[in-house]
Amino acid sequence: MVRLTLLSHMRNEEALLPMWLAHHKTIFDHGIIVDYDSTDRSREIIREICPTWEVRPTTVRRENGDAVFVPWFTDKELQRIEKELDGFKQILNTTEFLVVTDPNIKETLKSTVIYTPTGWEMIGRAPADPTELLELLDAVSCVESTGGRSRVLHDQKPACYQAGRHALRGRTATGARMKYTYHPAMFVFHLCTPFPYSERFYMRALGVKDILPRVYAGRVTGGRQHFKSRELFEECAAEQQKRAADAPNVWDMTPEPGTPEQALHYWRAMVVANQDGSCL
């Protein structure tokens, strides 16, 4: 049987972790989360919802011992962890949700194939402060393409990511060319910062810059969106809400099979069924 492992990193993610864990524990067999010295309840939340998952302290630190988020170092840290793992692996941020519309997905995965689910951003029409998955989904009004920015699912060992971890580079462990394929039952939905629109989620987004240097060792590190002012976040939220208001509401649609809208409807149905005590 194919084994699926989820990897991630976090820093004070108590706003999203309950929803993110509740969803992904129904898909993945195991999870490993690298903690960047969280000071909130993030570690406790993981123990409560996914008690068998691992939480590891980051090894990416300043000379004084403080955790620091430098993308090319964090990518290598996750790659080293992946080398320990058999089966298929995927790295997701806590703002990203993998949705699989095929309950027999493990039977369809083929070794040495790198799966690239399509990527979609979720936005809404109105302020929302969800604490549960159903509340989060009901706050979504429409989705927009991320323009190819997705998260690969693969069984390479070792794997070498391109910058941003949206694709692998080089060849497989056997020397063959990388073989990519889109899986029709896989979608990655991103929370499009600053959605959801609430004080709690604004503060989460603004707090990321505490461990993300704009420049490290003379090089720009990326993550510029985390250095926005509060005013720019609110302007971005207003623009997103306008775009969502001008688009058809996903929950009023009868979506076509294989579309991200259909995947959202499937996801919501599974959440409702689970709340009723049914099995996913």
Image (spheres, rainbow, N blue to C red):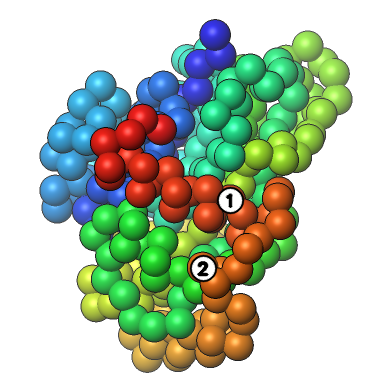
Give coordinates of residue 151: x percent, y percent.
Answer: 60, 44
Q: Is residue 46 above or below residue 236?
A: above
Q: Is residue 53 above or below residue 134?
A: above
Kind of residue sitting beneath label 2: Trp
Give coordinates of residue 179: x percent, y percent.
Answer: 82, 29
Crowd around label 1: few <14 · some 14–19 · many ≥20 (10 Å): many
Residue pictured at 31% horizontal, 63% vertical: 135
Residue pictured at 65% horizontal, 60% vertical: 255
Residue on which disc 1 sits: 263
Left or right of 81: which side holds 32?
left
For the C terminus, the quadrant is: top left
Q: Is residue 44 above or below residue 83?
A: below
Q: Quick one: 88 or 18, which is closer to the camera? A: 18
Q: Quadrant of residue 49?
A: top left
Q: Is residue 255 above or below residue 161?
A: below
Q: Quadrant of residue 196?
A: bottom left
Residue pictured at 71% horizontal, 57% vertical: 256
User: Can residue 37 be seen by looking at this rendering?
Assistant: yes
Left or right of 138: which side holds 44?
left
Kind of residue sitting beneath label 1: Ala
Q: CA distance from mark 2 to mark 1?
A: 12 Å
User: Can you name the residue that lies furthest to the top here?
Assistant: 1
Q: Quick one: 136 or 58, which is closer to the camera? A: 136
Q: Which mark is residue 138?
A: none
Residue on which disc 2 sits: 251
Q: In terms of sequence position, does the residue under pointer 2 or pointer 1 come before the other?
A: 2
User: Can residue 236 be seen by looking at this rendering?
Assistant: no
- How many numbered circles does the render carry? 2
Left or right of 88: which side holds 278?
left
